[in-house]
Amino acid sequence: MNEWISASKETLKLIGDMASKKPRDRLDLLNLMNLSLYAMAKSLLDWYQRLENPETLSMLSDEELQELAGKISKIAKEFVKYDIKTTRRFSKRGVKSDELKTFEDLYSQSLEDLLSFEDEEGY
């Protein structure tokens, strides 16, 4: 467990260092996103392993399990909502339309979609 915590702290430091680097070029941004997604994926896999371990689960009280489930489900909902919003936003890039002549036109239209998403879907 101590090794996992140390590795996770090092990953957080790398993400922080990359995120604070100025100026950043496109490759820096891609590297930051790749590292961030890798960190999330690794963390998720570790959670799956912990939840499949009866010994680990037996150490958690019902209250602790409820707290973890609430926090993790909240994080998951926020991430999936963000995923839906950005997928909608960037999927319009291939659309050829008289309404979308510049990037700014695309962005402002997508921003409206993002703001109305929560109302439409009941989130």
Image (tube, rainbow, N blue to C red):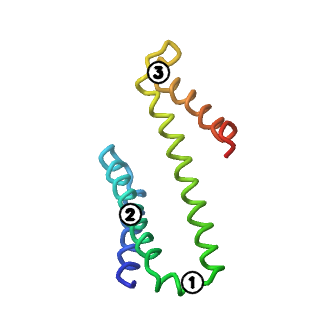
Q: Nearer the viewer, mark 2 or mark 3?
A: 2
Q: Which mark is residue 39?
A: 2
In whole angstroms, how far apart are the C-alphas of marks 1 and 3? 54 Å
Label located before the other in sequence (1 or 3): 1
Determine the residue positioned at 51% across, 81% down: 57
In whole angstroms, how far apart are the C-alphas of marks 2 and 3? 35 Å
Q: Is residue 25 above or below residue 16?
A: above
Asked if the residue under mark 3 is in contact with the one under mark 1, i.e. CB atoms within 8 Å, the reply is no
Q: Amino acid at mark 3?
A: Thr
Mark 2 element type:
helix
Determine the residue positioned at 49% across, 40% down: 86
Residue 52 spot, x, y in % from top left: 44, 75
Q: Is residue 17 above or below residue 85?
A: below
Q: Quadrant of the N terminus?
A: bottom left
Determine the residue positioned at 46% across, 86% down: 55
Q: Amino acid at mark 1?
A: Leu
Q: Is residue 10 left or right of residue 59?
A: left
In whole angstroms, how far apart are the C-alphas of marks 1 and 2? 25 Å
Asked if the residue under mark 3 is in contact with the one under mark 2, i.e. CB atoms within 8 Å, the reply is no
Q: Nearest the camera: 66 or 85? A: 66
Mark 3 element type:
loop
Label located before the other in sequence (1 or 2): 2
Q: Which residue is mark 3?
A: 102
Mark 1 element type:
loop
Residue 100 spot, x, y in % from top left: 50, 19
* Residue 85 occupies quadrant: top right
Q: Which mark is residue 60?
A: 1
Q: Amino acid at mark 2?
A: Ala
Q: Is residue 29 above or below residue 99?
A: below
